[in-house]
Amino acid sequence: MLFFIHLESRRILFAACTESPDSGWVTQQARNLTWELTELGMRPRFLIPDRDAKFAAAFDSVLAAEGTKVRRTPARSPRANSIAERWIASSRHEALDWLLVLNEGHLRCILKEYVKHYNRGRPHRRLELQPPTGDPPHGDRDGQVLVMTRLGGLLREYSRAAA
């Protein structure tokens, strides 16, 4: 699994998975990320991957061509990338541990739905119980409570209907 987090907003920008990632696959994901960020009008200053050998020079050059500096996490520092580690733990505890993943395509589907939930519907304590997109709760305080479910009811998002 490979994903990219916007640190200021805690928003997941891109997620991908494969059964056997290698440096070529990771480099292609870097290209996909730069295309997606260009469409969003974002130009990140830096990207922080871990020290895995899959993040080869080609990966760095794809990002450097877009003006993004690659900063590796320090060696033997498991807490250096704590935000990424927290997202992995959240996705496992809230979705993946509860589902039987059938294949790579199914995993992609699950991650796509979880990323939508994480960015748009899941409250975050650091963001004053707002989702990373910053969208205010819908409706007013007196409206009927509406429930939107994802992943067959495993994930729930609540809002109020307009009165």
Image (cartoon, helix red, strand yellow):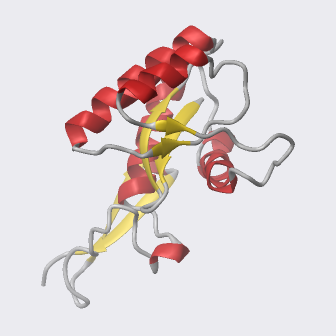
Which of the two residues, 45 or 96, is positioned nearer the viewer here? 45
- The location of residue 141, given as percent across then percent down, is 26, 89
The residue lying at 29 percent from left, 27 percent from top is 35
Residue 147, given in percent of the width and then of the height, sits at 34, 64
Q: Residue at x 66, y 38 (%)?
A: 72
Above or below residue 92? Residue 90 is below
Q: Residue furthest left?
A: 163
Q: Residue at x 53, y 24 (%)?
A: 60
92 versus 19 height, above or below: below
Q: Is residue 10 left or right of residue 49?
A: left
Location of residue 26 (image quadrant): top right
- Camera-nearest residue between 163 and 109: 109
Residue 82, given in percent of the width and then of the height, sits at: 69, 55
Judged left or right of residue 79, residue 141 is left
What residue appears at the point 32 percent right and 43 percent down from the top-left corner? 43
Residue 57 percent location from the top left of the image: 59, 17
Q: Work out whether residue 61 or residue 136 is closer to the camera in this orientation and state it.
A: 61
Which of the 4 quarters of the picture holds residue 9? bottom left
